[in-house]
Image (cartoon, helix red, strand yellow):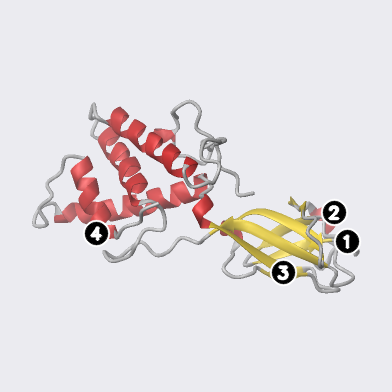
């Protein structure tokens, strides 16, 4: 995965969409191009699993405590999966996300106490586990994605692959312009992403779904066979 500065991504985007590469022309469009690249990066980061950006964070449960801060650098947005295991064990079991109001007493406390967390949910900048732990014998592990870095100034470096950002953004701009090249550019973007994610795991010939309902409509017509790359 090759990252690049925002300024270089804008230059490449101009080339891919047939715009002038002169820095003295098209300055009024730079803010729009910056925004589209930033938004495309967010959509790709949200919609796909990027194995090279996978991170883990562990947190020990505390007796009587059911609300916790996320382990750094996690927030809810970065979490993809949650697990629990006993201390000094490696038998991780997936935690189920979500609780309805039968889990919570009036006043906000959990309805039950006991070891072995079973459910979790986010609560603003923190998360809740259920039932309330009665010891410190269990841990929670989050698996997720490295947070996106700022991508606003010319010198800011992309978190994701720069070519993927440029090609998908170019496909959108060309589609807006009703260019005949839009479909070809979109296919190039999809093939590049397929190769990129497929080559970032050790079993390079084994890939699963790359597609996601989180994708915007303009790129949802995927190439057959694109699969998700699981974090596990």
User: From mark 3 to mark 2, how far is it between C-alphas?
Assistant: 26 Å
The residue beneath circle 1 is 111
Task: Judge from the rendering whether residue 215 lies leftward or rightward of residue 129; answer left or right.
Answer: left
x, y percentage for residue 149?
43, 64
Q: Residues within 10 Å of mark 1 (few under 14, many from 20)?
A: some
x, y percentage for residue 42?
44, 52
The vertical placement of 80 against 167, above or below, is: below
User: From mark 1 to mark 3, how far is it between C-alphas?
Assistant: 22 Å
Task: Judge from the rendering whether residue 111 lies leftward or rightward of residue 174; answer left or right.
Answer: right
The residue beneath circle 2 is 102
Q: Residues within 10 Å of mark 4 (few under 14, many from 20)?
A: some
**Residue 15, image quadrant:** top left
User: From mark 2 to mark 1, how far is it between C-alphas?
Assistant: 7 Å
Q: Secondary structure at mark 3?
A: strand
The residue beneath circle 4 is 7
Q: Secondary structure at mark 1?
A: loop
The residue at 52%/41% (across/down) is 214
Image marks 4 and 3: residues in contact by CB distance under 8 Å: no
The residue beneath circle 3 is 59
Task: Judge from the rendering whether residue 143 lies leftward or rightward of residue 151; answer left or right.
Answer: right
């Amino acid at each position: 995965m090759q990252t690049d500065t925002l300024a270089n991504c804008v230059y490449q985007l101009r080339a891919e969409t047939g715009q002038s590469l002169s820095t003295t022309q098209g300055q009024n469009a730079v803010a729009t191009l910056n925004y589209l690249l930033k938004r495309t990066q967010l959509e790709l980061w949200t919609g796909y699993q990027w194995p090279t950006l996978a991170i883990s964070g562990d947190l020990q449960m505390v007796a009587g405590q059911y609300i916790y801060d996320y382990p750094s650098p996690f927030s809810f947005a970065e979490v993809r999966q949650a697990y629990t295991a006993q201390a000094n064990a490696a038998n991780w079991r997936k935690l189920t996300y979500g609780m309805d109001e039968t889990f919570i007493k009036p006043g906000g406390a959990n309805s039950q106490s006991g070891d072995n967390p079973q459910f979790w949910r986010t609560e603003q900048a923190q998360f809740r586990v259920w039932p309330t732990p009665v010891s410190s014998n269990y841990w929670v592990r989050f698996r997720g994605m490295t947070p996106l870095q700022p991508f606003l100034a010319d010198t800011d470096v992309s978190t994701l692959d720069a070519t993927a950002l440029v090609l998908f953004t170019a496909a959108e701009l060309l589609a807006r312009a009703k260019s005949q090249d839009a479909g070809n550019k979109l296919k190039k973007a999809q093939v590049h992403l397929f190769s990129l994610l497929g080559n970032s795991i050790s079993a390079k010939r084994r890939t699963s779904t790359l597609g996601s309902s989180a994708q915007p409509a303009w790129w949802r017509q995927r190439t057959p066979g694109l699969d998700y790359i699981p974090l596990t």
